[in-house]
Amino acid sequence: MRRMLLISRIAVLVLLAALAISFFVSPMPDWAVRVIGVTMMAAVFTLTFATVRLRKTK
């Protein structure tokens, strides 16, 4: 669980950085922003699942 938690945290941070670059530096194509959004939803779900499961087992 700890590995999944670490990987999902890293994924969320990388995806947030990509969205920030798209917003502040140069706009990305629509399909890229949509892919980043869908991937971020999956990463947030995984992060929530791993956090709850880790706290439940302690």
Image: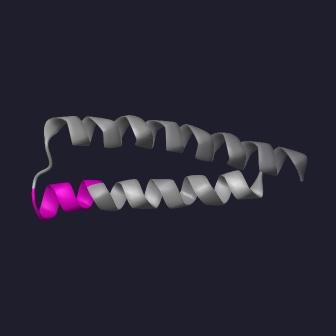
Q: In this orientation, which residue lies closer to the viewer: 24 or 30? A: 30
Which of the 4 image quadrants contains residue 49? top right
- The residue that appears at 73% across and 43% down in the rendered structure is 52
Looking at the magenta stretch, what is its main secondary structure? helix
Q: What stretch is highlighted in magenta?
A: 19-26
- Across and down, in percent, residue 22 comes to 18, 55
User: Magenta segment: does it hold 25?
Assistant: yes
The correct choice, above or below, for 28 with respect to 30 in the image is below
- Chosen colour scheme: one colour
- The residue that appears at 12% across and 65% down in the rendered structure is 25
Which of the 4 image quadrants contains residue 26? bottom left
- The residue that appears at 15% across and 49% down in the rendered structure is 28
Q: In this orientation, which residue lies closer to the viewer: 58 or 9? A: 9
- The residue that appears at 24% across and 42% down in the rendered structure is 33
- Across and down, in percent, residue 6 comes to 64, 60
Say left or right for 7 vs 25.
right
